[in-house]
Image (spheres, rainbow, N blue to C red):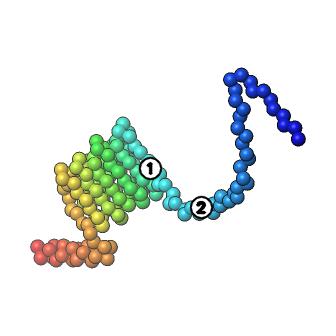
Amino acid sequence: MEQWSFPEREGQSESPRVEPPAKAHVIPAPIPAPVLKESAPKARHESIFGPGVTIEGTIESDADLRIAGKFKGEIQIKGALSIDKGAHIAAKINAGSVTIAGQLEGDIVASSQVRLLESGQLIGDLKAPTLTVAAGSRMRGHVEFGWNPSEAAKFASDRAQDSDKTKTAG
């Protein structure tokens, strides 16, 4: 058998022989199972009345409301009401929760909570299961909080009976 040889080119050496790699056993990546997403609660929408806005009337909504301007009237919402610092509100309010950083003159009934922030001022009556009052805030009015609905109803009827007794005695 004859062996063939080729003369090397100047400055180059013969390249080493590379053997093909042995056939590797490839394990396919597992197919991920479909991820089931829990249906997240729909994001609440928030209406915003800016600092330059003045409105008079009635607001009814299922969504959240933020007021930074002036409002006079009645607010009936199921969501959260935020009264920003600098806002001036004169209203009867029935809401899920109320946060007061501005000035409010009127009565509040909240089904969840009321937060009176440091810059907040309330002149009016307040009724809510939970009340948070920050140092520096101001309030003048009647407050009821921490009572469950049946206790509150009993208290209201007891107060009415006491009031009737005072009128007949005087």
Q: Residue furthest right?
A: 1
Disc 1 is placed on an element classified as strand
Disc 2 is placed on an element classified as loop
Amino acid under disc 1: Glu
In this image, 44 relative to 71: left or right? Answer: right
Vertically, is 20 above or below 76?
above
Residues packed near mark 2 inside 10 Å, few (<14), some (14 to 19) or many (20 plus): few
The tag on residue 35 is 2
Front residue of 42 and 101: 42
> Marks 2 and 1: CB-CB under 8 Å?
no
Please state the horizontal and vertical placement of residue 102, each as a whole percent of the image.
Answer: 27, 46
Which part of the image, by quadrant, shows the N terminus? top right
Please state the horizontal and vertical placement of residue 121, each as a whole percent of the image.
Answer: 23, 50
Upstream in sequence: badge 2 or badge 1: 2
Front residue of 86 and 74: 86
- Where on the picture, by quarter, is residue 134? bottom left
In this image, 169 relative to 1: left or right? Answer: left
The tag on residue 54 is none
Instruction: Read off the residue under disc 1.
Output: 46
Residue 105 appears anywhere in the view: no
Residues packed near mark 1 inside 10 Å, few (<14), some (14 to 19) or many (20 plus): some
Q: Which residue is drawn at 22% across and 57% down?
A: 133
Which part of the image, by quadrant, shows the C terminus? bottom left
In this image, 159 relative to 35: left or right? Answer: left
